[in-house]
Image (cartoon, rainbow, N blue to C red):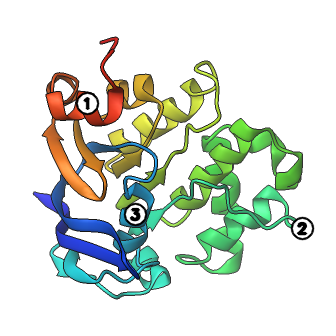
Amino acid sequence: MAILEVDNISKRFGGLLALNDVSFGVEKGEILGIIGPNGAGKTTLFGVVSGFIAPSSGDVRFDGQRITGISPDRLTRCGLVRSFQIVQTFADMTTLEVVTTAALTRRPLRQAIDYAAEVLTRVGLGAKLDETPATLSLQDKKLLEVAKCVATDPQCILLDEVMAGLTMAETEAPMAIIRELNSSGVTIVMVEHVMPVIMRMATRMVVINFGEKIAEGTPDEIIKDRKVIDAYFGEHLDA
């Protein structure tokens, strides 16, 4: 059963066609990877799905309901939440306060504080409740971004390049957390450039190039697709 449906989404910014008639579905409980070259339209797509950008045409449905045009805060309360490629934090807040702010979408203050501490512990930041985001390593900032999403009790999380800038060793902790979330019933949609990560994580993949979907399938199918190799991987693909 599809929890998220993207139907013929197009988006123009003036004369630029950033997305052109993109359609795909996301099954409840899966991990879907979205890949493509820089500038392909992936982050724009996330912006449309999460309510930050209005599409020029097309529709988005979540859990069977049309959500096109619904604001991000309302979508969060419906169970659809996104992370950001550039980590979004409040510099003068502690990590506990940042995640508490997210938890307030579902809980009164006292419960939100307790749940935020629980979530931070769950993602490995339990010892850093009183630190500010500026003092955190890049890996911990990425984990904080995930924690903000988790604190909203989502059904589906859109993760925008959560592994960007990390070493392969540093990706292990986020991957373990994402797998644990998925095992608990959370659907994951990942935009990711770190190919070893997405190939290990995704059960299915969608490939976008110049704003158009050019392929969809399992990771094994995607790495053998000639259009994908030409557009994304280049001529020399180490499979």
234 over 33 or under it: above or below: above
Q: Could one spot residue 20 in this view of the protein? A: yes
* Cα distance in 3D space between marks 1 and 2: 45 Å
Q: Nearer the viewer, residue 229 or 167?
A: 229
76 over 40 or under it: above or below: below
Query: Residue at the location (72% across, 47% down)?
Result: 141
* Residue hosting label 1: 230
Query: Residue at the location (45% across, 66% down)?
Result: 81
Q: Residue 46's mark? A: 3
Q: Quadrant of the N terminus?
A: bottom left
Where in the figure is residue 164, as x and y percent of width and height?
Answer: 58, 38
Q: For residue 174, what is the image quadrant?
A: top right
Q: For residue 138, what is the image quadrant?
A: top right
Query: Residue at the location (36% across, 87% down)?
Result: 70
* Cα distance in 3D space between marks 1 and 3: 24 Å
Report whether 211 appears left or right of 121: left
- Give whichever of discs 1 and 2 has the lower sequence position: 2
Q: For residue 233, what is the image quadrant?
A: top left
* Label 2: which secondary element: loop
- Give whichever of discs 1 and 3 has the lower sequence position: 3
Where in the figure is residue 27, as x and y percent of width and height?
Answer: 17, 52
* Residue hosting label 2: 92
